[in-house]
Image (cartoon, helix red, strand yellow):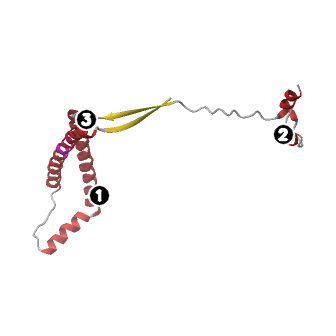
Amino acid sequence: MAKARAALEPGPLARRRALRPGRSLLKAKPARSSVTTRPVERRYRQTVRRVDLWSVLKVAVCFYLCALVVALGASVVLWTLARGAGAIDNVEGFMDDLGFQDFEFLSWRILRAATLIGLVVSALATILTVLAAAFYNLFSELVGGIEITVVEEE
């Protein structure tokens, strides 16, 4: 019985804190729970053994064509800004001073050439990407593929 009462009574440090002015023994803070609740997470190990070449082709074509459109759009904006600032006219005048007669930039020809070069580069990059995916499929049979750990949190 004495042990039970001693367990219920606060210790000397708690009594000193509680007896400070403005505090009472009844307003003691509740003890923290030692159990912390963490979100439940599940881990899965997955292995990428094969990549579908058709899906790689579709994604690569979309990616490289979008990159071409962005690059051409940025080129047109920069060309317009350079033309408005007079930089294009200064370069044309400099070329005339070097001895080139009637040197002139034809912006539509430059844009057409950049578009054709960009399409060729996009086609080559797409072919190289699909070729790299095919090599991945060959090497993953020997090595076992890439292992990925997926964490699912609730």
Q: Bounds of the magenta span?
A: 125-130
Q: Quadrant of residue 19?
A: top right
Viewer-nearest residue: 151 or 56: 151
Give the CA distance from mark 1 to mark 2. Answer: 75 Å
Q: Report crowding for label 1: few under 14, some 14 to 19, many 20 or more residues within 10 A (C-alpha).
A: few
Give the CA distance from mark 2 to mark 3. Answer: 66 Å
Looking at the rendered image, the disc whose residue lies closer to the viewer, 1 or 2, is 2
Q: Which residue corresponds to the image point at 11% horizontal and 67% vertical from the top-left?
A: 102
Q: Residue furthest left?
A: 101
Q: Which residue is mark 1?
A: 81
Say what amino acid the circle numbered 3 marks. Answer: Val
Say what amino acid the circle numbered 2 marks. Answer: Ala
Q: Quadrant of residue 91?
A: bottom left
Decide: is 91 above or below 28: below
Q: Which residue is mark 3?
A: 51
Viewer-nearest residue: 35 or 20: 35
